[in-house]
Image (spheres, rainbow, N blue to C red):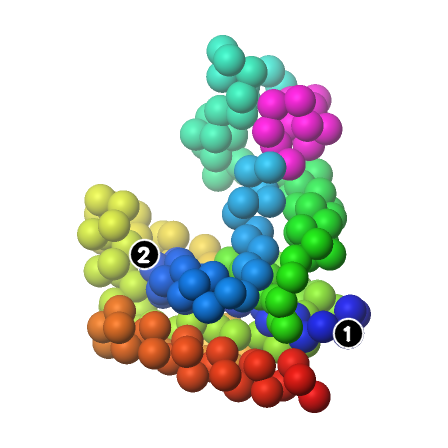
Amino acid sequence: MASRLRIGLTGGIASGKSTVEQRLIELGVPVINADDSARAVVARGQPGLAAVVQRFGPGVLRPDGELDRPSLRNLIFQSPEKRRDLERILHPLIREHMEQQASGAVGPYLVLSIPLLVEGGGARDRVDRILVVDADESQQLQRLMSRDSLSAQQAHAILAAQASRSDRLKAADDVILNSGSVPELRQAVDRLHHRYLELASR
């Protein structure tokens, strides 16, 4: 573990993680995002993309040679075994990419934003503290349906595939409850930022 304070940011889908991330970036905190790294390791010409094509065939490529995400998503949703194969290929590459980004980041502390931090296990060997953005499930469902134009059934299925709210809260060192307005959420981030600066200075 590096000596610099490392915070693992996570939370259920549509819980408000993006708003928290944005505010941290505004405050000058380096945020390393797992989703960005996931896109980077399967960009055209990357070994990750070649490994995905070798396992799943050329049907997961678009005509321009980029990854056809909807096609790949359909494949792995139909088969837990294929999903595990994809995770075995990509997770080590994503982790390595995030560590490379982290090594060049400047700031008193850094944040690793990992949506599936709790589900993936092994969080404690990557971060010093886990910050969970928490929201009531009914609020998540409403936000998800509104944001992504989903039916209630689709939204429920997505939530069911993630770690439960109670599992995330059990793993948390710090919790931001996102039950109010965006300004209130940003103020909560500001308060936690001051606490992390204090912890980082020790």
25 to the left or right of 147:
right
Q: Do tag 2 and tag 1 residues touch (Cβ < 8 Å)?
A: no
Residue 179 seen by the camera: no
46 in the magenta segment: yes
Residue 60 percent across, percent down from the top left: 54, 22
127 to the left or right of 154:
right
**Residue nearer the viewer, 179 or 86:** 179
Amino acid type of the residue tagged 1 in the rendering: Ser
Q: What residue appears at the point 26 percent right and 73 percent down from the top-left corner?
A: 183
- Element class at badge 2: helix
Q: What residue appears at the point 41 percent right and 76 percent down from the top-left corner?
A: 189
**Residue sitting farthest toward the top:** 63
On residue 3, which mark appears?
A: 1
Residue 67 seen by the camera: yes
170 to the left or right of 144:
right
Q: From this view, report whether residue 92 is shown above or below residue 175.
A: above
187 in the magenta segment: no
Residue 45 percent across, percent down from the top left: 66, 22
Q: Based on the displayed image, in which of its 4 quarters is residue 4 positioned?
A: bottom right
Amino acid type of the residue tagged 2 in the rendering: His
Q: Which residue is mark 2?
A: 156
- Element class at badge 1: loop
On residue 36, which mark appears?
A: none
Q: From this view, report whether residue 109 is shown above or below residue 156.
A: below
- The quadrant of the image that shows the C terminus is bottom right
Residue 15 percent across, percent down from the top left: 36, 65
Q: Based on the displayed image, in which of its 4 quarters is residue 119 positioned?
A: bottom right
Q: What residue appears at the point 60 percent right and 44 percent down from the top-left corner?
A: 37
Q: What residue appears at the point 36 percent right and 52 percent down from the top-left corner?
A: 157
What span is colored magenta in the figure? 41-54
Instruction: Give the total of numbered labels.
Output: 2
